[in-house]
Image (cartoon, rainbow, N blue to C red):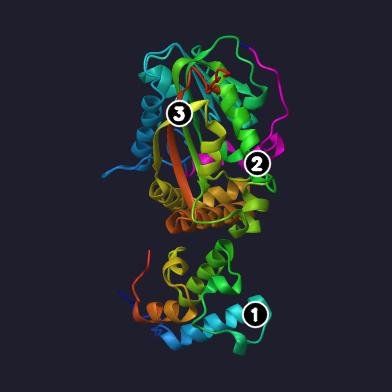
């Protein structure tokens, strides 16, 4: 079940750590209680906490992970999905991948014997046994570098889908959530986002994802929940403003101002539709496409 | 509710907001204010979402009002934005 390690085609370890290793305490000031750092799934009457839980449950159901043996979470953040899988969905073993040292340490410190976490990229991952479901929330955004051509991006994404295909048992699902370019092109985005917030990273377009997974996975459901991400960013910004003094004490004025601006720019992006939030259920194609052999004569 | 000690300040009119925006954009682009057409979309002056957020923040500070960062998505020219803000004094959040 192992795979050859290839060079990570996406954002580097340094780039990921630039964003995610600011400080756990800082993120705890403005994220939900479980520190879920991706768009929530909002319904009437939700708080940020309940909407984040709804999102996690959505992906667990989307990936058909309930009661299965082994589930992989690619880009597991602070482990809120891993916890939910073993605590509420009777999953025997939940395995998380993260490129953030503070995140992996945070999960290891909780010492749950059913949860494993690896400080590695999907491209370095070599499981010894197959998985029954894969979830990836808010990681795909980092799988391509800025200034790659669309074809280069698709090749990198396809490598990711090939790995997932290889690791999954027949008939299993991958539940994917990612930000993507919507009514926009990469050049519409400011240097602020590229340099200050997500260095070394380029977002996917839906068409690139579709092309990359063709003949490996079939798309079962696809949602664009950009309004959910706008609302999530508004909730985060409100929390950060409410806890501003504590945040400045932790990370300094400049970092707090940078995050406030990043959240505001994201709100504008999702509100205007320049950015979209894709949620996809992908079913493994157990017999990937092979060309028809025509008989001669 | 204003206290007796607070200063009563009249909110800027649409025309004053327009002048502020024209001067702001001219300074940011390092061009003469006369070259700014209030009816040309911000986007055509090269204002990306990051610059738009900064502008909205600076404008809110000047107006002493909390402005939503998405304002420039719906009010796409100086004229539209200043007319909207000149006609509303409530907090726009």
Instruction: Say above or below: A166 vs A182.
Output: above
Q: Which residue is mark 3?
A: A218
Q: Within 10 angstroms of label 2, few (less than 14), some, or many (20 or more) residues? A: few
Give the residue drawn at x 33%, y 76%.
B2
Q: Secondary structure at mark 1?
A: helix
Q: In the orientation shown, which residue stands out farthest toward the left?
A: A44
Q: CA distance from mark 2 to mark 3?
A: 20 Å
Label 2 lies in what chain? A
Nearer mark to the viewer, of 1 and 2: 2
Are discs 1 and 3 located on one and the same chain?
no
Instruction: Say above or below: A84 vs A47.
Output: above
Q: CA distance from mark 1 to mark 3?
A: 52 Å
Label 3 lies in what chain? A
Q: Residue B89 magenta-drawn?
A: no
Please state, as top left, top right, bottom left or bottom right, where the C terminus of chain A lies in the image.
Answer: top right
Q: Which residue is mark 1?
A: B27
Q: Earlier in the sequence, mark 2 or mark 3?
A: 2
Position of residue A186 measured from the top left corner of the image (x, y, whole percent): 60, 54
Instruction: Say above or below: A162 vs A262.
Output: above
Residue A218, by quadrant, is top left
Q: Residue A13 magenta-drawn?
A: yes
Give the residues drawn in magenta, as a range: A2-30
Q: Within 10 angstroms of label 1, few (less than 14), some, or many (20 or more) residues? A: few
Give the residue drawn at x 65%, y 34%.
A156
């Amino acid at each position: 079940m192992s795979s050859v390690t290839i060079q990570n085609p996406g954002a580097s370890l340094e780039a990921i750590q630039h964003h995610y290793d600011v400080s756990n305490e800082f993120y705890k000031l403005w994220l939900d209680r479980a520190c879920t750092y991706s768009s929530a799934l909002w319904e009437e009457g939700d708080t940020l906490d309940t909407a984040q839980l709804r999102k996690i449950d959505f992906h667990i159901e989307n990936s058909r992970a309930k009661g299965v043996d082994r589930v992989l979470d690619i880009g597991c953040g602070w482990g809120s999905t891993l916890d939910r899988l073993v605590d509420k969905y009777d999953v025997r073993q939940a395995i998380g991948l993260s490129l953030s040292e503070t995140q992996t340490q945070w999960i290891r410190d909780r010492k749950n014997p059913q949860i494993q976490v690896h400080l590695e990229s999907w491209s370095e991952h070599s499981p010894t046994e197959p998985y029954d479901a894969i979830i990836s929330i808010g990681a795909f955004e980092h799988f391509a570098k800025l200034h790659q051509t669309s074809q280069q991006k698709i090749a990198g994404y396809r490598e990711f889908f090939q790995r997932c295909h290889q690791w999954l048992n027949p008939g299993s699902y991958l539940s994917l959530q990612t930000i993507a370019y919507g009514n926009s092109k990469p050049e519409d985005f400011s240097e602020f986002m590229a340099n200050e917030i997500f260095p070394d990273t380029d977002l996917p377009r839906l068409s690139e994802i579709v092309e990359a997974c063709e003949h490996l996975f079939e798309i079962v459901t696809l949602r664009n929940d950009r309004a959910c991400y706008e609302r999530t960013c508004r909730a985060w910004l409100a929390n950060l403003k409410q806890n501003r003094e504590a945040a400045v004490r932790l990370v300094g004025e400049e970092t707090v101002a940078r995050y406030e601006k990043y959240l505001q720019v994201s709100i504008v992006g999702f509100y205007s539709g320049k950015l979209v939030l894709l949620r996809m259920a992908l079913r493994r194609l157990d017999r990937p496409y092979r060309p028809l052999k025509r008989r001669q004569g | 509710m204003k206290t007796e000690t607070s200063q009563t300040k009249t909110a800027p009119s649409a025309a004053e907001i327009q002048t502020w925006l024209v001067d702001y954009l001219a300074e940011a682009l390092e061009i003469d204010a006369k070259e700014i057409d209030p009816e040309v979309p911000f986007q055509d002056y090269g204002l990306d979402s990051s610059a738009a957020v900064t502008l909205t923040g600076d404008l809110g500070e000047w107006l002493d009002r909390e402005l939503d960062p998405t304002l420039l998505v719906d009010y796409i020219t100086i004229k539209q934005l200043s007319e909207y803000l000149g006609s509303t004094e409530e907090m726009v959040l």
